[in-house]
Image: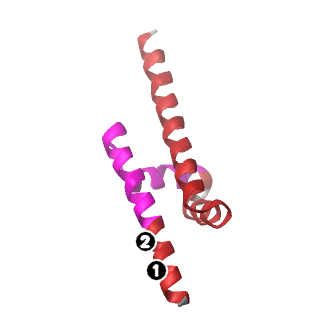
């Protein structure tokens, strides 16, 4: 039974990360792989640990919310860069 629960949790995390990857590709012409490389360089390889911690503490909705906030931060950063280029 425990193996089935782990498989279900892994499947849910995979689906959430797949959706996040799709958003990165659609909105930023990037990928989850590149996002992880960039964030791990800044945060000493903590992306996977953060995903596990958010999942453990807040479940699937919390993980979706966390990744949604990351997308918002990227969008805000891109807008700031466009403003800087325009001035």
Give residue 18's position: percent from left, percent from top: 38, 58
The outermost residue toward the top is 87
Q: Which residues are magenta?
A: 13-42
Count of numbered tags: 2
Give residue 2's position: percent from left, percent from top: 55, 88
Q: State which quadrant residue 16 falls in.
A: bottom left
Closer to the camera in the image, 11 or 47: 11
Q: State which quadrant residue 40 falls in.
A: bottom right
Point 48% across, 85% down: residue: 4
Question: Could you tell me what secondary structure mostly forms the magenta stretch?
Answer: helix
The outermost residue toward the bottom is 1
Residue at the disc numbered 2: 11
In the rendered image, residue 34 lying in the magenta stretch gets the answer yes
Point 42% across, 16% down: residue: 85
Point 37% across, 45% down: residue: 23
- Labelled disc at residue 45: none
For mark 1, does the 10 Å Cα neighbourhood hold few (<14), some (14 to 19), or many (20 or more) residues? Answer: few
Give residue 50's position: percent from left, percent from top: 61, 60
Point 48% across, 41% down: residue: 71
Q: Is residue 30 above or below residue 16?
A: above
In the rendered image, residue 16 lying in the magenta stretch gets the answer yes
Q: Is residue 79 above or below residue 14?
A: above
Residue at the disc numbered 1: 7
| Alpha carbons under labels 2 and 1: distance apart | 6 Å
Circle 2 SS class: helix
């Amino acid at each position: 039974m425990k193996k089935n629960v782990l498989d279900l949790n892994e499947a849910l995390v995979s689906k959430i990360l797949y959706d996040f990857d799709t958003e990165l590709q659609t909105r930023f012409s990037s990928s989850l792989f590149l996002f992880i490389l960039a964030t791990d360089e800044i945060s000493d390889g903590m992306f996977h640990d953060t995903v596990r911690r958010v999942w453990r503490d807040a479940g699937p909705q919390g993980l979706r919310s966390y990744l949604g906030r990351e997308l918002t931060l990227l969008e805000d950063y891109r807008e700031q860069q466009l403003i800087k280029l325009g001035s």
